[in-house]
Amino acid sequence: MFFAPNKAKKPTHVAIYIGNKEFIHSSSSKGVSYAKTNNSYWKPMYIDAKRI
């Protein structure tokens, strides 16, 4: 999953989708954490996702 503020073209943050509408990511303030895909902070910054 790729995220960027204000729908920027280049992502500034990445995460791994783990199922059940959740993803895992790392932040400088909280370390590794889980979040929901409909989280009010992350949802507007979502750009795209790719399967690898």
Image (cartoon, rainbow, N blue to C red):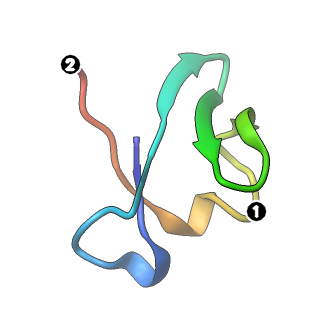
Image point 65% across, 28% down: which residue? 21
Question: Circle 1 — which element?
Answer: loop
Residue 51: where, in percent of width, then height?
24, 23
Residue 42, quarter of the rendered image: bottom right
Q: Residues within 10 Å of mark 1 (few under 14, many from 20)?
A: few
Comparing 43 with 35, the one in front is 35
Q: Is residue 10 above or below residue 3?
A: below
Left or right, residue 4 beside residue 22: left
Q: Which one is closest to the eye, mark 2 or mark 1?
A: 2
Residue at 38% x, 64% y: name it: 12
Which residue is depicted at the point 60% across and 30% down? 23
> Is residue 15 shown left or right of residue 38?
left
Residue tagged 1: 40
Give residue 52's mark. Answer: 2
Q: Quadrant of residue 29?
A: bottom right
Which badge, 2 or 1, comes first in the chain's sequence? 1
